[in-house]
Amino acid sequence: MLKANWLKQKVKSDKKQGPSALSESTAYDIRIATARKAAELASPSKSKDESSYWLRLAYAETEAKKFDEAVADARRSIAAYKSENAKAHTAFSFCSDGLALAIANGGYAADAESIMKEGSCQVSSVAGAGTMPAQAQMSNQFEYFVRRKEYGKAESTEVFPVHELESGALCTANHDIHICRFGGPFPIESSMEIIRRFVDTAKTPP
């Protein structure tokens, strides 16, 4: 009830400021309030959707440029990632590079990088190192560093563990969605060589 009354007062206030404020500010506030309520309702029941609800809230907060809140709720999403999420999490990533890039561009680069690393660690811990969910999340972290032009970090073993690269463990039954394939032969004999070539290409001006 208090939240509903607050939103009503917010709408009245924005109407006084004009239609632009009403369409932007109020829309963000309503979306954030709705997403937060869904996440809070899912938390006590330990719902399998809890992680995705917190992540949706983080996205909404990022769009509203509420980066402190977005960072906190992205971490809640990571903490809530459980085995049920890993079962549904196959060829797509968990914490996207788009979310982290928006947070980084908002002046929170250290937090954005930390979120990507924490997401990769959580997925690997829950789903297992080298599984498709873990590969997808590592790929997302790799893309984040490339898009930030932090090529040294993109090539680093923090993103792709050395033992997995050297053993050629980054393979799946469906090679068409192999994250390191890039049109090359299958199975890949040297994942690290492909990563280096990819980064070298990204560094080269068009």
Image (cartoon, rainbow, N blue to C red):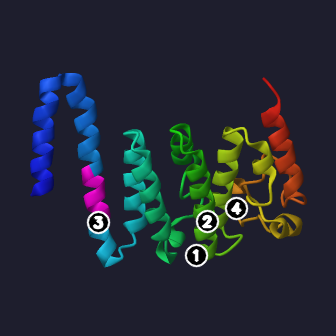
Q: Position of residue 184 (x, y in %)?
A: 84, 49
Calculate the distance from the C-alpha at mark 4 to the C-alpha at mark 3.
37 Å
Q: Secondary structure at mark 3?
A: helix
Calculate the distance from the C-alpha at mark 3 to the C-alpha at mark 1.
22 Å
Q: Secondary structure at mark 4?
A: loop
Q: Which residue is mark 3?
A: 40
Main secondary structure type of the part rendered in magenta = helix
Q: Position of residue 47 (x, y in %)?
A: 35, 73
Q: Which mark is residue 93?
A: none
Q: Is residue 56 left or right of residue 135?
A: left
Q: Quadrant of the N terminus?
A: bottom left
Q: Which residue is mark 2?
A: 133
Q: Which contiguous range is marked in magenta? A: 33-39
Q: Quadrant of the C terminus?
A: top right
Q: Amino acid at mark 1?
A: Val
Nearest to the eye among marks 4 and 1: give it: 1
Q: Which residue is mark 1?
A: 126
Residue drawn at point x = 51 percent, y = 76 percent: 83
Query: Which comes before the other along the chain, label 4 or label 1?
Result: 1
Q: Residues within 10 Å of mark 2 (few under 14, many from 20)?
A: many
Answer whether residue 110 is magenta in the image.
Answer: no
Q: Secondary structure at mark 2?
A: helix
Q: Which residue is mark 4?
A: 174
Calculate the distance from the C-alpha at mark 2 to the C-alpha at mark 1.
9 Å
Q: Position of residue 118 (x, y in %)?
A: 59, 63
Tell me how many marks there are.
4
Q: Secondary structure at mark 1?
A: helix
Q: Residues within 10 Å of mark 3 (few under 14, many from 20)?
A: few
Query: Which comes before the other along the chain, label 3 or label 2?
Result: 3
Q: Residues within 10 Å of mark 4 (few under 14, many from 20)?
A: few
